[in-house]
Amino acid sequence: MTKNKTSKGKKKTNNSEKKTAKTVDAYHENDPRLRGEKEEKLADKFYEKELFRLQVEMVKLQEWVKEKGLKVVIIFEGRDAAGKGGVIKRIMEHMTPRICNIVALPTPTEREKTQWYFQRYIEHLPAAGEIALLDRSWYNRAGVEKVMGFCTEEEYKEFLRFCPEFECSLVRSGVILIKYWFSVSNMEQERRFKGRALERHKFWKLSPMDMESRSRWKEYSKCKDDMFFNTDIPQAPWYVVPSDDKKRARLNCISHILSVIPYKDLKPEVPKIPPLKEGKGYKRTAMHTQTFVPKIY
């Protein structure tokens, strides 16, 4: 009788273990979540509500960073149209640029091309109490510069060798460094490019460089693999964000930021708005002496 109970107990344990194994939140190469396939679309109402909840938490994190004098660098990398800009836009929506700012550097000038490669990025690193969101970063050398031939093979190899040392130095100096790679499929990227070509307000997002990247998909893939192999270090690991589903990518990325930087709600006091005092000895300027914008609407 005792033997049967033990056997049943073992069976329950095994079932529990199997159930746990199925619910572990880990991706594998055949997981449809990697490409946003076979998943029901998030309801707009749920997405907007959850996004706002996370944005409120980001404001709390912002206050914590300022109070504790933290220095935070968040790198957003990935192929063109992978969704980096969309996530950054949602992060910044309710935050102050005095604490959290976007770093999106243009093509280097002739002078900058002669500088030490990391030099122009260093001046944009945060001081105490600041957050820097890098919309592309020094990893340009491991991607577009390598693929398009904008750097020499020696410069590329030196970057892969030195980059981990550079990032370890940042971390040792107290910088919280978080690196995201937004992974978009070939088909989804093409769909987004075609969509941009149909919308006038998005024409600027299409450049000859973007079109060239389409024809060099495999070269970019190889460079990305080499980049991960050389720079995915314990001090500053790469986090991959499957981004074929934009809404899920945004929510997953923002929630992950909140999970890797411990913070508390400081619950600042809301200042009392004082009553308006009537000023004496002031006469408002006549309205007809001012120039107003045309009342079209």
Image (cartoon, grey):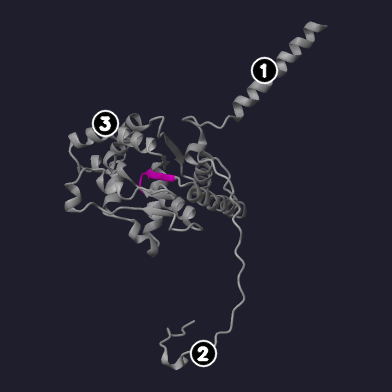
Q: Secondary structure at mark 1?
A: helix
Q: Is residue 122 magenta?
A: no
**Badge 3 element:** helix
Q: Residue 29: where, in percent of width, then height?
A: 46, 30
Which residue has dot 2 on it?
281
List the single residue furthest toward the front. Answer: 281
Q: Nearer the viewer, mark 1 or mark 2?
A: 2
**Start-end of magenta stretch:** 71-80
Residue 191's place in the image compared with 35, above or below, is: below
Checking the image for residue 227, the label placed there is none
For label 3, the crowd category at 10 Å Cα-Cα, with few meaning under 14, some 14 to 19 and many 20 or more, is few
Q: Quadrant of residue 4?
A: top right
Disc number placed over residue 14 in the picture, else none: 1
Q: Residues within 10 Å of mark 2 (few under 14, many from 20)?
A: few
- Residue at image position (60%, 64%) is 271
Between marks 3 and 2, how big is the CA–CA gap?
70 Å
User: Which amino acid type corresponds to the residue marked 1 in the rendered image?
Assistant: Asn
C-alpha span from label 1 to label 2: 85 Å
Mark positioned earlier in the residue sequence (1 or 2): 1
Q: CA distance from mark 3 to mark 1?
A: 46 Å
